[in-house]
């Protein structure tokens, strides 16, 4: 396996691992009655299995020659993730203090969607941009639904974001399996 192939396979494995885990988390956000509760549970299980598959790919590609680590890229990645968690955390505290805690999942969803934009060039994956757009659209749909109807915003963003992240994780896992 070449350096580039090893790096891409490992990156896809990590993508399936991380996004599978986060899809599992998002599927657990909404409180729902049957039959949606069963579908969310099935999504969680599928996402968790995808994450396990990504972990296996990552572990198996660890021994493959992947070349030197880019420490500057690692620092930029860490900065993006820290900024994401800080913005989501501070926003959640502000929304809760204002009595709008039911919209915390919407804010977190929007922040998650936005964080894919700086990650796309850093990870060399331009498809993270459309994923970010789709997740931001889910956040907007959750906000509008939560404001205009009796449907929980958390139900919309939890289900929508879980489906999007699971789909992307499955894509990454399939690409890693081909490589």
Image: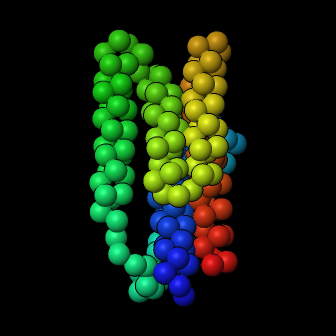
Residue found 58% across the figure and 32% down from its top: 136
Q: Is residue 73 above or below residue 147?
A: below
Residue 16 x/y as whole percent: 54, 63
Q: Is residue 37 above or below residue 102?
A: below
Q: Is residue 102 left or right of residue 90?
A: right
Report the front residue among 32 and 92: 92
Q: Judge whether residue 135 can be spotted in this image.
A: yes
Residue 144 x/y as whole percent: 62, 18
Q: Judge whether residue 155 can be spotted in this image.
A: no
Q: Is residue 40 left or right of residue 97?
A: right
Residue found 46% across the figure and 44% down from its top: 118
Residue found 59% across the figure and 44% down from its top: 129
Report the front residue among 49 and 135: 135
Image quadrant assignment for residue 53: bottom right
Coloration mode: rainbow
Residue found 55% across the figure and 78% down from its top: 5
Q: Is residue 131 above or below residue 12?
A: above
Q: Give the tally of numbered discs.
A: 0
Residue 101 x/y as whole percent: 41, 21
Q: Quadrant of the C terminus?
A: bottom right
Residue 170 x/y as whole percent: 64, 62
Q: Residue furthest right?
A: 35
Q: Quadrant of the N terminus?
A: bottom right
């Amino acid at each position: 396996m070449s350096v580039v192939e090893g790096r891409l396979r490992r990156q896809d494995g990590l993508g399936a691992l991380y996004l599978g885990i986060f899809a599992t988390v998002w599927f657990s956000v909404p409180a729902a009655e049957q039959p949606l509760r069963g579908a969310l549970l099935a999504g969680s299980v599928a996402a968790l299995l995808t994450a396990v598959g990504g972990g296996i790919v990552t572990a198996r590609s660890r021994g493959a020659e992947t070349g030197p680590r880019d420490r500057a890229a690692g620092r930029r990645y860490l900065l993006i993730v820290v900024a994401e968690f800080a913005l989501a955390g501070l926003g959640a505290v502000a929304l809760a203090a204002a009595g709008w805690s039911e919209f915390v999942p919407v804010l977190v969803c929007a922040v998650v969607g936005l964080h894919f934009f700086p990650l796309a060039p850093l990870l060399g994956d331009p498809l993270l941009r459309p994923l970010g757009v789709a997740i931001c659209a889910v956040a907007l749909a959750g906000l509008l639904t939560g404001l205009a109807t009796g449907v929980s915003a958390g139900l919309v963003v939890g289900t929508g974001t879980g489906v999007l992240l699971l789909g992307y994780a499955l894509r990454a896992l399939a690409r890693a399996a081909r490589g």
